[in-house]
Amino acid sequence: MKRVGKFAFALAACMLIASPALAAEKIRWKLAMTWSSTLTPLASPAPKLAKMVSDMTNGNFEIRVEGAEKHKAPLGILDTVKGGQFEMGHTASYYWKGKDITTVFFTTVPFGMTSDEQMAWLYYDDGMKLQQKVYDKFDVYSFPGGNTGVQMGGWFRKEIKSLEDLKGLKMRIPGLAGEVFAKLGVNVTNIPSGELYTALDRGTVDALEWVGPGMDIKMGFHKIAPYYYAGWHEPASDMQFIINKKEFDKLPSDYQVILKTAIQAVNADMFAENYDSSAKAWAEMKKEFPNIKVMVFPDEVLKAMKKANDEVMEAYAAENAEFKEVYESQKAYLKKARAWTKISTQHYLETADKVSE
């Protein structure tokens, strides 16, 4: 479902043989990542992309990848790509909500689409068109750059038993979810990834969310906070490749096709890598830290989250026509897609669980 067919690579390979541009053009680009080079799977797509592009152009198109540990501007990727310091970036769209709130949709929104639903909306409905409409104002092209699937709701030092337990809680959580929690009395902050463990360990925050077991295990949060809550806020977190428009438009058409093909390939690959790493990491966590308790927020809390989220979304839609356009597009697509998700994936899992008991 999430694979790019082999025909795409065969087509690109045939183009390489026939194209005089590939023999003549020597392109050298730089790509900046929001993450450090070792933070896989988030850091996996960019170097894989660079290798694929180099291989398919016989080394004529090279992309040098820099992690956040080198360029020192993890949350400045959009500005550096727009300004031309880097031709490309690998990041997440919702980091730019302060510049344009509509960017959040192209990562994920609380109580939104699953990864299957979101990918279908992007590639086969209005998603990609709307995404580019938003990013045209920044003079960059934007493409999906890997999906984490459903993210966990976070690591908590104490169990959340009621809405009262959220009031005054200090938590790191970005995006619209932070606004939702703020409405429920949480003191929300956004801390760079390199400072998260220390903040949780020293009590600077009482809780935080990151991604899922595959990446969380590397951060060590499970050694401090025993309550691991199921997700609600990021059901399908897409990463993002952004490309400086002027630089992309200068590329020979062959290179443009190769670059877009490679982007779609690593987009699919990251989902598989992340799923695999989380499955393996969770098995390790359960074995080595049996005190970890997987929790679901109480119904009272979940209903309050949903109500607060609806209020946040409707408020933005009322004041921002572009936000409303994307919001309505996602709601319309989700109404169709969720019916299929329920009779396919959800019913299958319920059936499989019954016969496995």
Image (tube, rainbow, N blue to C red):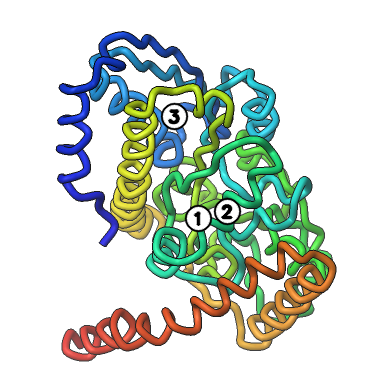
Mark 1 is surrounded, within 10 Å at the Cα level, by few (under 14), some (14 to 19) or many (20 or more) other residues, namely some
Mark 2 is surrounded, within 10 Å at the Cα level, by few (under 14), some (14 to 19) or many (20 or more) other residues, namely many
Residue where numbered disc 2 is placed: 131
Residue 10 in the image, given as x and y percentages of width and height: 15, 37
Please report the residue visible at 28 percent of the width from the left and 16 percent of the height from the top: 22
Please report the residue visible at 49 percent of the width from the left and 71 percent of the height from the top: 113
- Please state which of the two labelled residues, at mark 3 or mark 2, is closer to the viewer: 2
Horizontal side of 293 relative to 298 (left or right) equals left
Mark 1 to mark 3 CA distance (whole Å): 29 Å
Q: Nearer the viewer, residue 283 or 2?
A: 2
| First reached walking from the N terminus: tag 3 or tag 2 | 3
Horizontal side of 308 relative to 55 (left or right) equals right
Query: Are discs 1 and 2 less than 8 Å apart at CB?
Result: yes
Residue where numbered disc 3 is placed: 38
| First reached walking from the N terminus: tag 1 or tag 3 | 3
Horizontal side of 164 relative to 336 (left or right) equals right
Residue where numbered disc 1 is placed: 128
Residue 234 in the image, given as x and y percentages of width and height: 55, 63
Mark 3 to mark 2 CA distance (whole Å): 29 Å
Q: Which mark is residue 349?
A: none
Amino acid type indicated by mark 3: Thr
In this rendering, the answer to whether 51 lies above or below 170 is above
Mark 3 is surrounded, within 10 Å at the Cα level, by few (under 14), some (14 to 19) or many (20 or more) other residues, namely few
Amino acid type indicated by mark 2: Gln
Horizontal side of 301 relative to 17 (left or right) equals right
In this rendering, the answer to whether 143 lies above or below 181 is above
Mark 1 to mark 2 CA distance (whole Å): 5 Å
